[in-house]
Image: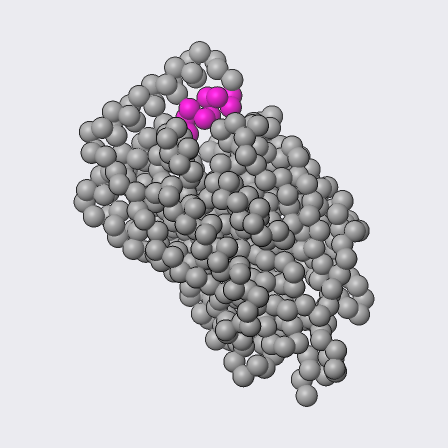
């Protein structure tokens, strides 16, 4: 009898294991996230990492989460990683979630059509993507190998002061931070901590040339310096942060400021750890649903080029007049968006956009159920209103974005599209897709109460 079966006897037992691998490039790389700046890395401030959490319940249901310090985990990369892990462990691909923290201080991992006119931005390096794939698979297999009888619990922290709505500091936001902790049943020592927070990790800007995970790195470091053991993996997932940013709360775009905000979030998380109530006999399952999204239609090139010129003139005027820093930054981003709209219009005319859309679709919606909690995975960047709409109908459900792929940009609200904000101007898909994703997700959540359709092959423990 294997060790997992021997430990369970007649009692239902949850098994958990976690591991971390290093995703840091070995050489200087272009740091992706801001246009028009030849931003080659000059060093490493903190190592990029892949953190993995493996969960398996006695009945055979299992899941694996992989949180990665990358700007995006593309659909093809995530697909290949999930297939390899499923083949090696028996955990179904539907129950494996691959996410990106969305750091803007790491390598290019996806080729964005909207950057086509920016000669400075290079294409993603296939060698680095192969390296990342190997490290993701390695992290998952290590987590499985380290699994032991465990308990799991969740509390929700409240993050205040780390960021706000990008366009209106009093606008829609999601300060709730679900904190999932797996601990050893034998020693009660934490085995892993997993958090979800809806905020762009963009304290560091284009003048920073050091590789970094931005403020989430400092959140992990804070937690591992006392509230959790130093060797406890911390998985950081990005929530629906499409219109969420630290822009209105940062005093400067420095590592000191990233540390301040990261530790602020860390203290909020640490505050709920003592109150977590743990469960052991929980069910674990995963489900996916594919959804075809509707592409956006673009106006003629001449019209969008004129809009780009007007946006640039507004930005330059505000900068000359010494307008407040957040206002100047918003105008600059609006100019970037208008410029990207012009490139998308050109790409729509010559067929490049249609090819990029095909690579994104169908969009895969995912739900991983762990006892009473549901973790939803959406590809791409979504406005926070959509995650709030899901949770309003399904409490104890937490949306993770940039999961298992990307969408060449944002899914915005109809209101944002009407206002012409940055995220709407460079979106590839129509805002009407947002409510469709919410509806499909709610239907998928309802089916989580049914018996899972895919379990590890033969019902055997994943090893």
Q: Quadrant of residue 344?
A: top left
Badge count: 0
Which residue occupies the foreground of this view, 169 or 390? 390
Q: Is residue 242 above or below residue 6?
A: above
Position of residue 63 in the picture relative to residue 306 (left or right):
right
**Which image quarter is the C terminus in?**
bottom right
Instruction: Report the magenta stretch's main SS.
Output: helix
Give how far across and how far down residue 249 sits, in percent: 60, 28
Is the image coloured rainbow, by chain, by secondary structure, or in one colour?
one colour
Residue 148 % position (x, y)? 70, 72
Q: Which residues are magenta?
A: 325-334
Question: In the image, what residue occupies the spot 68% across and 71% down?
Answer: 15
* Residue drawn 30% across the image and 42% down it: 296
Q: Residue furthest top?
A: 321
Residue 141 to residue 319: above or below: below
**In the image, farthest residue toward the bottom:** 1
Q: Is residue 399 magenta?
A: no
Location of residue 73 in the rendering, given as x and y in whole percent from the top left corner: 45, 54
The residue nearer to you, when weighing 84 against 15, is 15
Residue at image coords 38%, 34%? 417
């Amino acid at each position: 009898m294997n060790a997992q079966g021997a430990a369970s006897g007649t009692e239902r037992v949850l098994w958990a294991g976690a591991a971390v691998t290093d995703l840091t490039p070995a050489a200087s790389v272009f740091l992706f996230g801001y246009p028009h700046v030849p931003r080659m890395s000059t060093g490493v401030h903190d190592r990029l990492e892949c953190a993995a959490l493996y969960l398996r319940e006695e009945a055979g249901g299992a899941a694996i989460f992989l949180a990665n310090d990358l700007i995006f985990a593309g659909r093809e990369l995530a697909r290949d990683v999930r297939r390899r892990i499923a083949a090696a462990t028996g955990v179904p691909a539907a129950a494996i979630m691959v996410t990106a923290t969305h750091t803007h201080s790491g390598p290019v991992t996806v080729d964005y059509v909207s950057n086509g006119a920016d000669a400075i931005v290079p294409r993603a390096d296939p060698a680095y993507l192969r390296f990342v794939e190997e490290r993701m698979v390695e992290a998952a297999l290590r987590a499985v190998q380290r699994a032991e009888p465990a308990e799991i619990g969740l509390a929700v922290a409240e993050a205040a002061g780390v960021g706000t709505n990008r366009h209106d500091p009093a606008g829609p936001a999601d300060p709730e931070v679900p904190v999932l902790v797996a601990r050893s049943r034998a020693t009660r020592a934490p085995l892993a901590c997993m958090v979800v927070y809806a905020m762009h990790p963009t304290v560091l800007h284009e003048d920073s040339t050091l590789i970094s995970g931005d403020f989430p790195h400092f959140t992990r470091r804070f937690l591992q310096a006392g509230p959790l053991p130093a060797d406890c993996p911390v998985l950081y997932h990005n929530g629906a942060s499409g219109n969420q940013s630290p822009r209105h709360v940062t005093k400067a775009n420095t590592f000191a400021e990233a540390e301040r905000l990261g530790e602020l979030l860390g203290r909020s998380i640490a505050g709920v750890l003592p109150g977590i109530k743990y469960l052991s006999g929980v069910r674990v399952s995963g489900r996916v649903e594919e959804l075809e999204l509707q592409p956006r239609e673009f106006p003629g090139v001449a019209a969008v080029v004129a809009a780009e010129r007007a946006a640039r003139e507004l930005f330059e005027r505000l900068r000359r007049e010494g307008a407040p820093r957040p206002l100047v930054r918003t105008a600059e981003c609006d100019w970037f968006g208008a410029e990207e709209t012009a490139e998308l219009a050109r790409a729509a005319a010559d067929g490049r956009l249609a090819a990029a859309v095909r690579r994104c679709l169908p969009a895969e919606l995912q739900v991983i159920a762990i006892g009473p909690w549901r973790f939803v995975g959406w590809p791409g960047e979504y406005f926070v209103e959509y995650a709030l709409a899901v949770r309003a109908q399904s409490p104890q459900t937490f949306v993770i974005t940039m999961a298992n792929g990307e969408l060449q940009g944002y899914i915005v609200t109809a209101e944002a599209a009407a206002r012409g904000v940055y995220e709407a101007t460079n979106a590839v898909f129509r805002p009407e897709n947002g409510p469709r994703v919410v509806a499909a997700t709610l239907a998928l959540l309802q089916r989580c109460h049914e018996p899972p359709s895919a379990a590890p092959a033969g019902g055997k423990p994943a090893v």
